[in-house]
Image (cartoon, rainbow, N blue to C red):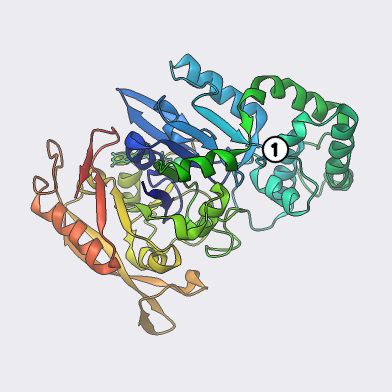
Amino acid sequence: MPIKMIVGLQYGDEGKGRAVHYEAKDADIVIRATGGSNAGHTVVANGKKYAMHLLPSAIIRPEVLSMIGPGVVADLKILVDEIEQMRKAGVKVEKDNFVISERTHITFPHHRQLDRLYEMLKSEKVGTTGRGVGTTYEEKARRTNLRMHDLFIGTSELKEKIKENLKVYNVLVSEANKLIEDGIYNEEKFPAITVDEEYNYCMEYKEKLQEFITDTHVIIDNAIEDNKLIIIEGAQSFWLDNDHGDYPMTTSSNPNASGTASGAGIGPTLIDEVIGVIKAYTSRVGNGPFITEQKNEIGDSIREWGHEYGTTTGRPRRTGWLDLVMIKHTKNTSGLTALCVNHLDTIGKFDSINVCIGYKYKGKIIKHVPIDKENCEPVYETLKAGWNTEGATTFEELPKEAQEYINFIEKYTGVFVKYIGVGADEKRTIIK
Ligand code: GDP
Ligand code: MG
C-alpha cells in the first residue's frame, strides 16, 4: 500500500483538509505532520462543516487512525477544546482512533505572549495568528522547550524544565514592559508567568490527553510492515516555508514536502505520492509578496464567492489570480506526482480570467521565481471562463472552458491534475 502526502503549494488554505479527508477514505493512518493551531483545515462532509486546527482532517472518519506527528507543536488547551468540540459534534475521538507523538512539542501560555511581543517589536509585521506557534518552534530550536513526553516525568524534574523554559521569556518581558511604560509602544503590558502557572497548565491538560500520547514511530513501523495505507497531512504551504518560501514573511517551520515527511517521521524514499493542492486562484493571509494580488473588485469578488476568510482567525484573505510560475517552482522542489485543483466552481463565475505565466523582472520576461519576488510584475494570459460546474460529476461533464483551464494548468506545470474541487462538499470532487 502506498504512502501519500498532501501539501499546499500556495499560501495555505488551498483546501488541504478537504483533499486529506477525500484521500483518507481508504486510509489506515493519517498523520498531521507540521504546524500548530495556526492551521485551519475545513472539511464539509455528511452535510456538516468541520474546522480542524490541530486534529488531523481524517478525525471525522472513525475507522482511520488520526495521528499528530513529532513535527507539530500543540497548544494543550486548544487541543483539548478541539477534541471536546468534535465530540460534541458527534465525532469519535478515542484512543483507538487518535494518537499524539510523545515527541510533539508543547505550546505554553508564554509562547502566545512572546508572539505578541515579537510582533510589537517588529517594524515589518509578519501578521502571525498570535497563537504562539512560531515562538514554540523558536524555543524548540533553542532546546529549552518541552514535549508531550515531559508531562510524564516527575514533578520536580518537570518544574525544573519549565523554569529553564521560562527564563528568557521573563527577561524579555521585563524589558518590553519598560518600553511600554516609557510610551514607546502602545500595548497592554506583558504578564510575568510563574513556573506554577505553567505546571498547572501541564497537569490540567495532561489528564485529558495522556491516553493519546504514545511512541508513534512504533505504530508507523508496524503499519509500514503490514503494508497499510498512510496519508501524511501537511499544514501551511510551500511559499510559507521558512527555507523556500517568501522569507521573512513565512511560517516558522518547513511545510514543504520534505519538511512534511520529516514532521511525520517517514523517510523520502518511502513516499509514493506527493499531491500538491492549489486553488484555481490565489489567496494569502498575512503580509508578504503577492504578485497576482487584485486589490480591486476582482479580488473582492474572489473573496466573496470563495468565502475567503480565515478558518482560524476570521481575517479576510488577500486574493488574486492563479500564479502558475509559483506553482511550477514547486514541481521539483516538492517532488510532485499530482495536483489537486480546488475552487474551480468559484473562478468560473468570472466571464474571463487571468492566469500568470511569467514575470516582468528587471526589464526581462522570466519564467522562474527570483528571490526578490516583490520586484516582479505579472504577465498574464487571459482565458475564457463563465462556466458552471453544477451537476458535473466527471471531468468530461465539466464545461469545455473549465476543462481547458485544467489542461492549461497541467501543460504549464507538467504535473498531472488528479482531482478537482467544484464545491466545498466532499461529494463535489471530480477525479480526472
Ligand atoms: P486548508 O487550510 O488548505 O485545509 O484550507 P481551508 O479549509 O482553510 O480553506 C479552504 C476553504 O475552501 C474551505 O472553506 C473549504 O470548505 C473551501 N473549499 C475547498 N475546496 C473547495 C472547492 O472546490 N470549492 C469551493 N467552493 N470551496 C472549497
Ligand atoms: Mg486553512
Q: Residue at x 78, y 53 (%)?
A: 142
In the image, taking residue 90 as reference, residue 187 lies left or right, namely right
Q: Residue at x 37, y 43 (%)?
A: 15
Asked if the residue at label 1 sits under 8 Å from ligand 2, the reply is no
Neighbour tally class for label 1: few under 14, some 14-19, many 20 plus, Cα within 10 Å: many
Q: Residue lying at the far front in this picture: please name it.
A: 225
Residue indicated by mark 1:
106
In depth, the one of 391 and 46 nearer the eye is 46
The correct choice, above or below, for 392 with respect to 364 in the image is above
Q: Is residue 244 visible?
A: yes
Secondary structure beneath dot 1 equals: strand
Identify which amino acid the numbered label 1 is placed on: Ile
Q: Residue at x 37, y 49 (%)?
A: 2
Q: Is residue 193 visible?
A: no
In depth, the one of 303 and 409 nearer the eye is 409
- The quarter of the image that holds ligand 2 is top left
Q: Residue 65, how many percent across, how many down?
A: 47, 31
Q: Residue 262, how many percent across, how many down?
A: 56, 54
In depth, the one of 113 and 186 nearer the eye is 113
Q: Residue lying at the far bottom in this picture: please name it.
A: 363
Q: Residue at x 25, y 55 (%)?
A: 417
Give the number of callouts.
Answer: 1
In depth, the one of 370 and 278 nearer the eye is 278
Q: Residue 354, how many percent across, how many down?
A: 25, 61
Q: Residue 430, how many percent across, how many down?
A: 20, 43
Q: Quadrant of residue 380?
A: bottom left
